[in-house]
Image (tube, helix red, strand yellow):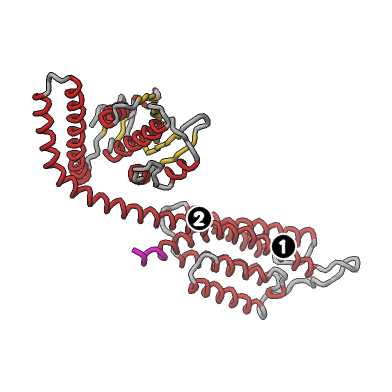
């Protein structure tokens, strides 16, 4: 929905601007209070201290209320951000009215809200802020409480007005440098997130197209697969005396059974998703089941498994897509190890109350090129398609986790698949 993207982005920018204003407002309250104390009690200038203290106190209450509001889940509309800016402009205008109006050296601070709004809000809202600030400035020219003379010299070289202008310049430069940079960094991060979402959507569209083709292929494969299973059973009976051939036929029969199970899982997965009842099982049982399925596919691989004691008692929502992702990682690791003359593959499983981590370690070459290929959904194998890793990444992200590849200091690569552990302690209560 392209039309909704600017609208949501406007919400994010408005919230970021409101957070920036909230922190700037606290700084302003502290600076205003310090200025009143210095001017009234150290410089001993005649200013309406009570009225200034009341205005600063009300601004502090508003600042605390805004911090509470920003911690609520409600979205921040751009017009609400404009309202917060209007409150700041009104408070600053009232303080300037009590301290000389347009003759106050700090009057140019009215430009600061316009700059911050321009960095995060749509043009029409920036125009509202600019018009409000300009109107307040014009009002302060004829109407204000005069200050005592600021151009009086002490010792012949001390000009309070020039000193105030210098302090105002320092405050404006520091505020603009810090807060505009902060807003720009937030916007760049938001743009990066939008770009990642766009890339993820494009990748998911490709996977969806492949899934559609896979559904049709599964339907078409069922008939020839049944024929193969029937012929294999007859061949096993005919060649029962030939032990070598019988073992090969047994292996082929096992692979055919595995293909049949995969086709059934496609149907079962769709049925469970429509029914909304994910399967729950102990994490250790999930790992052992994945191990047995992997051994059917790759009987020549020496797979060693280590499950930490804290993970043994956990339960997991065992989605077939997660099992497929784990088997794909194990298969890729097996290919890498075998290409380097080793049949070793290691799997370790760790879990806490929040997530589970599957670590798949191969003993292949473990080069930077292979690391980049695995991170970019490509295949370093001559006949590989790179689809297994793409599906593993998509599964991890869909489940709210991540998949990362790491070079090992001695040899090989380690794939870390982390997903939230939605289960609970298996011994805490009976399985539903």
Mark closest to the chain's N terminus, 2 or 1:
1
Judging depth in this view, the residue of 221 and 265 nearest the camera is: 221
Quadrant for the C terminus, please: top left
Q: Is 315 left or right of 65, judged from the image as shown?
A: left
Find out whether residue 318 is within the magenta segment: no
Q: Residues within 10 Å of mark 1 (few under 14, many from 20)?
A: few
Task: Locate the N terminus and report the quarter of the image it occupies.
Answer: bottom left
Q: What residue is rendered at 52% in x and 65% in y?
A: 120
- Work out whether 330 lies above or below 400: above
Is 62 on the left or on the right of 280, as rendered?
right
**In what element is the residue under mark 1?**
helix
| Residue 170 - label | 1
Rendered location of residue 254, percent (x, y): 19, 29
* Number of marks: 2
Residue drawn where x is 33% and y is 31% of the image: 424
- Considering depth in this image, is 329 or 300 the residue closer to the camera? 300
Q: Quadrant of residue 28?
A: bottom right
* Residue 386 visible in the snapshot: yes
Outermost residue to the bottom? 142
The residue labelled by disc 2 is: 189
Disc 2 crowd, CA 10 A, few/some/many (<14, 14-19, 20+): few
Residue 359 placement (x, y as % from top left):
41, 32
CA gap, disc 2 to disc 1?
28 Å
User: Could you say whether the residue bearing mark 2 is in a helix, strand or loop?
Assistant: helix
Q: Residue at x 68, y 74 (%)?
A: 101
Residue sitting at x 28%, y 52%: 208
Magenta stretch bounds: 1-6
Residue 400 numbered mark, or none: none
Provide residue 296's location: percent of width, then percent of height: 25, 29
Q: Is residue 322 above or below residue 77?
A: above
Looking at the image, is 119 positioned above or below residue 236?
below
> Taking the image as drawn, is residue 90 in sight?
no
């Amino acid at each position: 929905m392209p039309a909704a993207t600017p609208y949501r982005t406007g919400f994010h920018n408005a919230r970021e601007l409101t957070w920036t204003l909230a922190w700037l407002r606290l700084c302003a309250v502290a600076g205003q209070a310090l200025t009143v104390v210095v001017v009234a009690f150290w410089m001993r200038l005649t200013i309406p201290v009570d009225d200034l203290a009341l205005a600063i106190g009300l601004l502090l209450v508003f600042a605390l209320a805004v911090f509470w509001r920003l911690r609520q889940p409600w979205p921040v509309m751009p017009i609400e951000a404009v309202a917060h800016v209007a409150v700041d402009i009104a408070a600053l205008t009232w303080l300037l009215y009590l301290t000389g109006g347009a003759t106050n050296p700090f009057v140019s601070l009215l430009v600061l809200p316009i700059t911050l709004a321009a960095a995060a809000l749509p043009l029409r809202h920036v125009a509202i802020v600019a018009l409000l600030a300009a109107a307040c400035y014009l009002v302060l020219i004829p109407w204000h409480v005069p200050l005592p003379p600021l151009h009086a010299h002490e010792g012949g070289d001390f000009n309070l007005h020039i000193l105030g202008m210098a302090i105002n310049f320092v405050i404006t430069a520091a505020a603009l440098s810090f807060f505009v940079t902060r807003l720009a960094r937030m916007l760049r991060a938001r743009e990066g997130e939008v770009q990642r979402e766009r890339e993820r959507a494009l990748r998911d569209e490709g996977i969806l197209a492949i899934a559609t083709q896979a559904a049709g292929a599964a339907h078409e494969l069922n008939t020839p697969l049944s024929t193969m299973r029937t012929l294999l059973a007859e061949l096993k009976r005919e060649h029962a005396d030939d032990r070598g051939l019988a073992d090969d036929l047994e292996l082929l029969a096992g692979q055919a059974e595995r293909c049949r199970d995969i086709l059934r899982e496609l149907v079962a997965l769709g049925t469970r998703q429509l029914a909304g009842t994910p399967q729950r099982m102990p994490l250790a049982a999930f790992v052992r089941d994945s191990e047995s399925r992997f051994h059917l596919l790759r009987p020549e691989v020496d797979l060693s498994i280590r499950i930490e004691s804290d993970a043994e008692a956990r339960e997991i929502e065992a989605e077939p897509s997660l099992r497929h992702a784990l088997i794909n990682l194990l298969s890729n690791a097996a290919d890498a190890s075998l290409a380097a003359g080793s049949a070793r593959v290691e799997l370790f499983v760790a879990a806490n109350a929040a997530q589970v981590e599957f670590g798949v370690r191969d003993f292949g070459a473990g080069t930077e090129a292979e690391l980049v290929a695995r991170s970019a959904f490509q295949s370093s194998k001559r006949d590989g398609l790179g689809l297994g890793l793409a599906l593993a990444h998509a599964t991890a992200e869909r489940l709210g986790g991540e998949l990362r590849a790491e070079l090992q200091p001695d040899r090989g690569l380690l794939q870390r698949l982390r997903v939230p552990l939605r289960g609970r302690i298996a011994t805490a209560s009976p399985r539903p």
